[in-house]
Image (spheres, grey):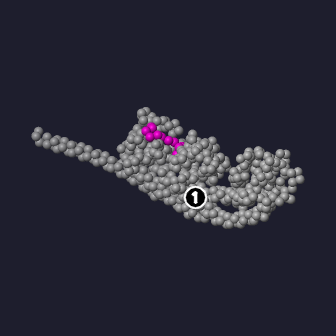
Amino acid sequence: MDGTSSEPVVHTEKLIRQLAKRDSELLEAKKRIRQLEESLDARAAETAALRRIAEATGHVVNPDDLLPLIAEVALESTGTDAAYVYLFNESRDYLVLRAATDKSLDASMFGTLKVAVGEGITGWVARERKHVAIASEAWTDERFHFIKSLGEDRFQSILSVPLIWHGDVIGVVNVKTCAPHNYTKTQVQLLSSIASQVAGAIQASRRVRSAEKRASHLSTVADVSRAITGDLYLEEILQLAVAATSRIMSFRVVSLSLVDEEKGLLVLKAVKSQSKEYQKRPNLPLTQGISGKVIASGQAHTVLNVQDEADYVHSALAKQEGLTSVAMIPLKVREQVTGVLSCYTEKPHRFSASELDVLCTLGNQVAVAIHNANLMVKGALLQEMHHRVKNNLQQIASLLRLQRHHSAGRSSAEVLDESINRVMAVAAVHDLLSRDDLDTIAIRKIADSIVTATQQSLTSPMHRIDMSVEGPDLRLNSKHANSLALIINEMVQNSVEHGFKITQTGEVQVRITEEPEHWLLQVRNTGDALPEDFDWQKHHDLGLKIVDSLTRGDLGGVFSLYSKGDWTISEVRWPK
């Protein structure tokens, strides 16, 4: 009986063990199902997040428009309280806060709040290329760096993940919670997946923008090239160049200055700016400031902040007008720098190599266009000079005929000397016309040439005559300049011949004076005084007749000759 009764007990225990095993297996299966469900939920959340990012990437080209969405996706996917997106600046020496879901932040912080590489948890993640997850009291971590403006004392936990694309860290994504929070492996993997997708989207967006920007730059350069190679005057080319350059990158100010070797100055010629103060800024010596370095080296030069740059001459003006960064581009023709193109930005800007390439290309084309414009002007002037030389040779022939009729009783040498001086006066005008940039002549230069020639040819070693030229740098067109050159020559020659027949020492002054409605030319000399009853209109001197004829006929003016104190004054007054 005992043996028989024990069999049901054994059988019952076996059933109990089997049921317990089945219950354990069932619990394990349920646990596994929950894990699978959680994994599926995580995958679904990841898929949904990535889908949102992919859809946004397809419609948004500008990364600045994409980043707020990325912060929102990171927040919703991880179930945290705040999300922040940081990206490297162009030179990759610091991270910049670009987007956040934290509504308490001031909008001015985006694009301006900086985190150095290695600084705080965010900087450490960027440097080490590893994620960081801290469940509570994140501020106790030795890598933590408190940024007051972010209000970081509100948050207990942080999960920081690097944005990596093709092995390069381009930024960092942070999520935070106000209460302690243990970040699961699934959350870390999810945020890492989002970060990877974000990195790719940002880089793709940047490539698109870079290609569009490059195409826009090349298009602008092509447009400028077509325009400046047309039949434009120099001033039109300069204004077109600064306007087009300003349009390329939305510069605040663009200026173009040309080298003036004669004056030793870099002369401002064209400006694209609303600032009248900048347009009035003084010209700089060729060796001074940053532009001096550009001219000396022939290389482009950039400054991140001209307001703090010791070599920048107009720092006070830069602060007043809100100018920060600048790229100064040399204008070169055959390795010779002929000018400088200066491009200013309102905010700090590090010019990329591609930007400098575009600006240098534009600068070289502008330089060639300026050179060609000058050659066209020179060519036109040469053609015009051909006609003028022909006309002036006829004028010289007429003077020689007059000289022949007034040469009685005079030596051949005297007659030839006077004729030579008249020819030299006309030659001085053509010499200056061939060297000046415009179709006008500086009268002071003509007067200097005539005075020098007269001292060499008409004054004997026995005479000590001081000659000088005074007055403004009056410029006249070549026709009037020819006439005035002959007038100055005759008046100076007359002063030397008749003022110092007896007197051996004295002074001859050529004075040019501007009056409200007239110009006044005086040749004054000391020495022998005029006779008391002298009337130049009754005198038969050829030189005075030439002066009077040219004054009335070509200048529409009046000639007079009189004494004043110790001075004899020949005077020509003509309207402006």
Seen in the picture, residue 93 relative to 382 is either above or below; the reply is: above
162 left or right, relative to 470: left
**Secondary element at tag 1:** helix
Q: Is residue 76 left or right of residue 396?
A: left
Q: Residue at x 74, y 63 (%)?
A: 400
Task: Locate residue 430: give its quadrant.
Answer: bottom right
Q: Is residue 13 visible?
A: yes
Indicate whether residue 112 is drawn in magenta: yes
The residue labelled by disc 1 is 371
Residue 523 image position (x, y, % from top left): 78, 51
Question: In the displayed image of the protein, which residue is found farthest to the right?
Answer: 533
Q: Which image quarter: residue 348?
A: top right
Figure quadrant of the N terminus: top left
Q: Is residue 510 left or right of residue 112?
A: right
156 or 113, nearer to the observer:
113
Q: Give x and y (percent) for residue 497.
A: 77, 52
Residue 123, horizontal then vertical, whole percent: 44, 40
Q: Report the residue at 57% width, 46% height from top.
A: 292
Q: Residue at x 72, y 61 (%)?
A: 479
- The kind of residue tagged 1 is His
Q: Position of residue 144 (x, y in %)?
A: 44, 36
**Could you classify mark 1 by the number of other residues whose Cα lies within 10 Å: few (under 14), some (14-19), or many (20 or more)?**
some
- Answer above or below: position of 226 versus 176: below
Using the image as rendered, state which of residue 482 and residue 346 is in the foreground: 482
Between 505 and 239, the one lying in front of the other is: 505
> Looking at the image, which residue is at 82% across and 57% down?
559
Q: Quadrant of the C terminus?
A: bottom right
Does residue 169 show up magenta in the picture? Answer: no
On the question of residue 181 being in view, the answer is no
Work out whether residue 410 or residue 292 is closer to the camera in this orientation and state it.
410
**The residue stretch that appears in magenta:** 109-121
